[in-house]
Image: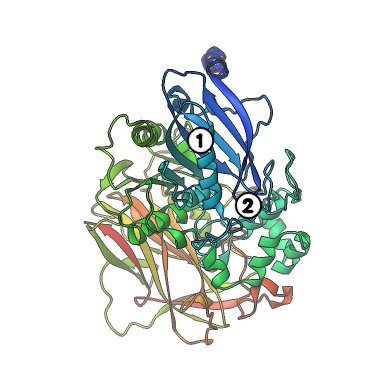
């Protein structure tokens, strides 16, 4: 212990000195300028610009447009030097951050997801793409010593604005990197998955954090927030009851929340806010980045890339997916998530070998990208990067694994005529928790958490293979194909794909967590049963009638090692990650507390299967 203390004392000052040295270098070698850039409709957007003092060469421009503030305002310098963006400073980039329309110090009306307008006819026809165009145009014409080449990057919501930037059509825009981009808030990002409200994230973000609160005029002060009481999210959200009780708290000031409550089904309002709608004839090179275990926007990266391939095939598009939580690729530590180790610092490798070289190539004309494949994907389980000429790979073989009686999971096709099933009772008053421990903020580690706590519940079905005789590698989308019957008229179905470690696995050396028998969550997804045939036209179940519920789950990239077991868990609540289904065919967003009832659910053996993307 004394030795450890000595090392901490010894190295902390060195780390602090390095930080201070980098900060001093930044201030001494860069000039900060704050401007308001006029848009075509007269609205002015606040923009912070950091320019190299070096005038011996011309410099590229790298932009991030954000709803989260380009602070610090005034004379203070942004802390680029605290993370890998220091590399861009050392490379001499002009770094630009802009408050988007209607946020913080920018004028105009904020819209949570402003639809892309492909038919702009007057200066009043604006969107995030036109705001980016006008920003780029002003920068290349007014910032001294720029080389006329611009890039845009951003994570999460700034990733959405990066996607919109790519649709701007400005000729100076050469490279764009949407990272965990908010893409479709109905199907898989942030607010909903397959039409199921991600209650904790949506309420905490829009209401607690105040993201959807209007900014009536430019201000350096944050919007109004709501202090969610307590320290136990399960207890708090359960005590709140039906969704109208949450809406009462929001009042009438949160336009986006109110719109979600009156648009429960997929319709024109949601389609207009799908960022993929405008992805056509994209000119800049695209680097789409995401995390296998991103709890917020796992959907966005996979599907933005697929939209580029399908809708804009002439675009030079690349995909990078690492074993990361939301934004972990931009952090200093990409070695692990929770109890799962990745064998190396994957974030550092990505920063040095992919992102910085990507922008250097397109904005500075330096280096080459010969080693950058169409898709670069990290496979957990084996802890290796793999490169692919396309994604999903042409080497994938969709392989069903069948749910059988006695909690068995089998790759063998069932014999015809089987009509057995497993039964559980789903009780909205006692929903299955999404994580084991008592806490308040939604964890990011749940994406790889040990699922033994859930397997012990009677309202969770568990199916498991024998110990695998060979490695099995999955790479691509998973399909859940269930045959079910209900005692009522609606239900949610959560399917989990799990890697069960051998009983003799050694404890995690860092956390001391017992890894023998660890049930690692590889992928999980929810589906609201009423949407089984159409997300636009929901249908009630006929009580007692066997009914197919088939849905897509996000892509996986994972190797189940020899000696491990493949497990599938099925349940009908995942709380408070997702909102509770009353288990009756009612308008859930306007349901009463009395609408929530118990339900008996049958999952039929052999007819139910999970279709896995097995890499040959």
Where residue 371 sits, quadrant-wise, is top left
Mark 2 crowd level (few <14, some 14–19, many ≥20, 10 Å Cα): few
Q: Is residue 429 visible?
A: no
Image position of 270 (left or right of 260): left
Image position of 210 (left or right of 381): right
In what quadrant of the picture does the N terminus appear? top right
| Residue nearer the viewer, 14 or 149 | 149
Q: Is residue 596 visible?
A: yes
| Residue nearer the viewer, 142 or 128 | 142
Task: Give the residue number, with chain letter if any, for mark 1.
Answer: 141
| Residue 40's disc number | none
Measuring from the top left, give residue 606's x and y in whole percent. 34, 76
Measuring from the top left, give residue 172's x and y in whole percent. 42, 41
Measuring from the top left, give residue 481's x and y in whole percent. 39, 72
Q: Are marks 2 and 1 in contact (CB under 8 Å)?
A: no
Mark 2 secondary-structure assignment: loop
Q: Residue at x 62, y 56 (%)?
A: 112
For the residues labelled 2 and 1, the Cα–Cα distance comes to 19 Å
Q: Relative to 412, does residue 5 appear above or below in the rendering?
A: above
| Residue nearer the viewer, 196 or 5 | 196
Where residue 496 sits, quadrant-wise, is bottom left
Mark 1 secondary-structure assignment: helix
Task: Give the residue number, with chain letter if any, for mark 2.
Answer: 41
Q: Residue at x 34, y 61 (%)?
A: 310
In what quadrant of the picture does the C terminus appear? bottom left
Image position of 86 (left or right of 575): left
Q: Relative to 447, does residue 570 appear above or below in the rendering?
A: below
Mark 1 crowd level (few <14, some 14–19, many ≥20, 10 Å Cα): few
């Amino acid at each position: 212990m004394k030795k450890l203390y000595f090392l901490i004392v010894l190295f902390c000052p060195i780390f602090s000195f390095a930080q201070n040295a980098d900060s001093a270098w930044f201030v001494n070698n860069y000039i900060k300028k704050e401007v308001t850039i006029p848009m075509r409709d007269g609205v002015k957007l606040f923009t912070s610009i950091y320019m190299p003092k070096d005038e011996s060469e011309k410099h590229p421009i790298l932009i991030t447009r954000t709803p989260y503030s380009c602070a610090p305002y005034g004379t203070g310098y942004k802390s680029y030097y605290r993370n890998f963006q220091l590399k861009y400073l050392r490379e001499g980039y002009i770094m630009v951050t802009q408050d988007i329309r209607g946020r913080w110090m920018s004028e105009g009306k904020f819209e949570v997801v402003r639809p892309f307008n492909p038919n702009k006819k007057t200066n009043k026809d604006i969107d995030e793409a036109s705001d980016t165009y006008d920003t780029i145009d002003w920068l290349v014409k007014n910032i001294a010593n720029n080389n006329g080449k611009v890039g845009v990057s951003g994570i999460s919501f700034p990733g959405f604005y990066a996607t919109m930037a790519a649709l701007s059509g400005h000729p100076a825009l050469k490279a764009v990197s949407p990272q965990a981009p908010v893409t479709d808030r109905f199907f898989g990002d942030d607010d909903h998955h397959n039409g199921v409200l991600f209650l904790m994230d949506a309420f905490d973000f829009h209401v607690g954090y105040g993201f959807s609160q209007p900014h009536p005029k430019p201000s350096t002060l944050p919007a109004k927030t709501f202090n969610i009481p307590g320290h136990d999210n399960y207890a708090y959200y359960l005590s709140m009851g039906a969704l109208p009780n949450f809406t009462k708290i929001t009042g009438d000031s949160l336009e986006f929340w109110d719109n979600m409550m009156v648009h429960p089904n997929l319709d024109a309002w949601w389609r207009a806010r799908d960022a993929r709608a405008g992805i056509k004839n994209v000119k800049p090179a695209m680097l789409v980045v995401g995390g296998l275990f991103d709890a917020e926007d796992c959907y966005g990266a996979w599907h933005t890339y697929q939209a580029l391939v399908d809708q804009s095939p002439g675009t030079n598009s690349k995909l990078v997916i690492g074993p990361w939580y939301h934004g972990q690729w931009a952090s200093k530590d990409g070695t692990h998530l929770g109890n799962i180790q990745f064998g190396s610092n994957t974030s550092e490798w990505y920063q040095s070998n992919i992102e910085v070289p990507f922008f250097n190539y397109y904005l500075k004309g330096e280096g080459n990208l010969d080693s950058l494949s169409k898709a670069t994907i990290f496979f957990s389980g084996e802890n290796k990067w793999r490169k692919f000429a396309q994604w999903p790979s042409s080497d994938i073989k969709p392989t069903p694994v069948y749910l059988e009686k006695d909690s068995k999971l089998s790759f063998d096709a069932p014999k015809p005529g089987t009509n057995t099933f497993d039964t559980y009772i789903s009780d909205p008053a006692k929903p299955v928790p999404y994580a084991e421990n008592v806490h308040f903020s939604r964890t990011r580690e749940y994406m790889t958490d040990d699922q033994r706590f859930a397997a012990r519940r009677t309202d969770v079905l568990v199916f498991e293979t024998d110990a695998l005789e060979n490695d099995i590698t999955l790479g691509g989308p998973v399909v859940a194909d269930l045959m079910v019957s209900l005692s009522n008229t609606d239900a949610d179905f959560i399917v989990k794909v799990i890697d069960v470690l051998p009983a003799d696995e050694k404890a995690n050396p860092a956390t001391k967590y017992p890894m023998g028998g660890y049930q690692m969550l590889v992928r999980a997804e929810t589906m609201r049963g009423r949407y089984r045939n159409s997300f636009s036209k929901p249908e009630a179940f006929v009580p007692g009638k066997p009914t197919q519920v088939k849905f897509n789950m996000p892509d996986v990239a994972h190797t189940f090692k020899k000696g491990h077991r493949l497990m599938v868990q099925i349940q009908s609540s995942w709380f408070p990650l997702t909102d509770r289904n009353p288990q009756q065919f009612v308008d859930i967003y306007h349901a009463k507390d009395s609408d929530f009832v118990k339900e008996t659910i049958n999952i039929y053996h052999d007819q139910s299967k999970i279709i896995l993307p097995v890499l040959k």
